[in-house]
Amino acid sequence: MTIESPTSGAPLDGEATTPAVPVLEARGVTKRFAGVTALDSVDFAVRPGESLALMGENGAGKSTLIKVLTGVYQPDDGELLLGGVPAKFARPLDAQRNGVSTIYQEVNLIPLMSVAQNIFLGREPRNRFGLINFARMYADARGLLDVYGIDVDVRRPLRSLALGIQQMVALARSVSINARVVIMDEPTSSLEAREVETLFSVVSLLREQGIAIVYVSHRMDEIYRVAERVIVLRDGRVVHVGGLAELPRVELISLMLGRSVEKVTRGGTTAFGGSHASSAPPVLVADDLSRKHQIDGIDIQIRPGEVVGLGGLLGSGRSETLKALAGVMQLDRGTVTIDGKPVKSGSVPAAIRAGIVMLPEDRKAEGIVPGLSVRDNIVLAALPRLSRGGFSSKKNQDAVVEVFMKRLHIKASSPDQIVSELSGGNQQKVMIARWLAMSPKVLLLDEPTRGIDVGAKAEVQALIDELAREGLAIVLVSSEVEEVVEGSARVIVLRDGSLETELDGDDVNEDRLLAALAGGTDTAITPGADK
C-alpha cells in the first residue's frame, strides 16, 4: 500500500458540519469489467464511530464497491482516502494492515485450527526462541472474546463450534488487527436470534471505541436498528445518501428499485384465498417449506394454467423457495406434492420425474453447457426418454429440436451451432426448450429475462403467457416489479424468508406489491421518474 499527501475530508451529504475526517472514503470511483460499468463515479465516506448502511438490490454494485475498498479490485478511475490521505491498496492484506477489515457472509477462517489460532493467524505471539507462545496466545484470545461477551474455549477447533460463534470469532479477528473500519457483509444470515443480539451489542461497543461500521444487509429491521446513515446504490451509481431516521422504509425500497413515492389510501388488507386464474384443483401444493436461515413456513398452491409470482427483495427467499420446490435444496421440514403425490425432498431427479423443472437465475453457471451445440443443450435432459437400449438416434433428437426451435423462434445458424455463440435471449430460449421437451407440469422461472435485450425479453414474456394458456403451471421470480405484476395472476410476497402476504385479483398491482415489500406500511409506490 502507498499513502500520498494528506487532504481534508469532504462533508457528507446533508450534513451542516464536518465532525471528523472520514476514516475511509471513495471519490469518483469507477470500475469496469469487459465493457460493463459496475461502479460509475461512486462517492462514499464513513466516519469514525459511525454505522453506515450500504444498500442496493442484486447487481447494484455493493460487492464491487466492497472489493474496491478492501483491495480485491483496483479502481479504473477515482481514488480512495484513508483518514483523509490518498491510499492505494494493491491487495486485501494492505487494506487489513491499515485497519480495513471485512466480515463476509460465509465464514472465511480455517475450521481445523483452534479459535485462538484463527484470531491470531499470521500474528502469533512468539517467545524469545521464535516459537509460538501458546499460553500468551490463549490468554490474549480469551481476553479479546471476553470484551465482546463471547464465552468459548479458545483451544477448541473452530469447526466444533456453532456457525454463529464462528461468525463472532471472525469479528473478533477483524477487530484484533487494529481495525479502523469493519465492513459487515450480511453478518446475521447464519445467526440465531440470541446471537444476533450479541452482534448488535458488539457493534455498539465498536462504535464507542471509534471504529467505523459499514453494514450490508437485506433485512430492513436490522438496517434501521444498527445504522445511522445509508448509501443506496442502483446500477452502479449512488442514488441516495442521508440519515435513516427521516427515511421511511417504503421510500428506501423505492430508491433501491427506482420508483417515485406517493401516499395512497389502502382499502383494507390483502388476505389468502382470493380468486385464481383456474378453477381446477392445484397441480402443486407446497406446505410449510422450511430450511434453517433461508425459508420458514412457506405455503404455495398452483393450479394448471396459472402464473404465480414470487415477490420480494434480494434475500427474501425467492430463489431458495424455487430451489426447494425443484429438489435442489434439502428441506428441514415441509412437503411438496404434485397431483396429490409427494415428491422426495432434496432430489432433483425426483422433482423432474414428478413434472417440476426449473430455469435457474444464472444460465451461464447453472444452465447452458457452453461448449455443446444447441441440439445437445435442448435434448440433454430428455435423452433418457429418447433412448432405446441406451442409444439415442440423431433422428429422434432432431425431431424434438426442430419442434422447439420453431416454436420458441430460436435464432441459430443450425442446431449444430455452439450455444455460447447465441445471444443471451436465444440462450434463454434454449434453456426453456430443454425443459419443455420433458413435458413438465410445473415450470419454475428464476429471473427469466435478466441479461437479455428488450426484444428478446418481450418474446420470453409472450412465451410464458402462451405456456400458461396451454395449461402449464408457472412460478415466476423477477426483480422487475412490472414483470411480476403484469405476468402473474397472483403474487406471493416473501420477506426475510417468510410469507408476508398474498396479492390476488385487483390487489396485484405495483402499489400493493411495493407496500407489502416495505412491511405493510400505509405508503405505496407508483411508477414514475427517479427521485
Image (cartoon, rainbow, N blue to C red):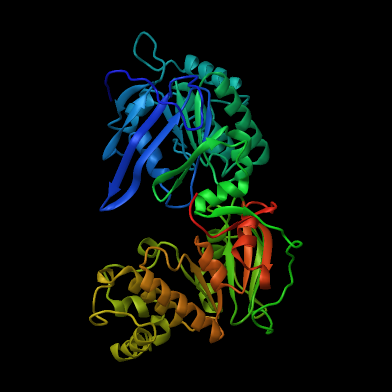
Identify the residue at image location x=40%, y=38%: 66
The residue sitting at the top extreme is 128
Q: Can residue 141 be seen in this view?
A: yes
Residue 307 drawn above or below residue 110: below
Where in the figure is residue 150, as x and y percent of width and height? 61, 26
Residue 137 drawn above or below residue 256: above
Where in the figure is residue 82, as x and y percent of width and height? 37, 24
Identify the residue at image location x=59%, y=23%: 205
Question: As rendered, which of 479 and 386 lies closer to the eye?
Answer: 479
Question: As rendered, which of 455 and 155 lies closer to the eye?
Answer: 455
Q: Can residue 115 be seen in this view?
A: no
Identify the residue at image location x=37%, y=61%: 365
Question: As rendered, which of 7 and 354 lies closer to the eye?
Answer: 7
The residue sitting at the right extreme is 268
Where in the figure is residue 318, as x and y percent of width and height? 56, 60
Q: Is residue 32 left or right of residue 145?
A: left
Residue 508 drawn above or below residue 462: above
Residue 307 drawn above or below residue 26: below
Question: As rendered, which of 425 and 205 lies closer to the eye?
Answer: 425
Identify the residue at image location x=47%, y=25%: 47
Q: Is residue 456 left or right of residue 46?
A: left
Q: Total label count?
A: 0
Q: In this view, does 63 lie to the left or right of 247?
A: left
Q: In this view, does 434 lie to the left or right of 421?
A: right
Where in the figure is residue 31, as x and y percent of width and height? 30, 43
Q: In which quarter of the image is the N terminus?
A: top left
The image quadrant that residue 197 belongs to is top right
The image quadrant that residue 343 belongs to is bottom right
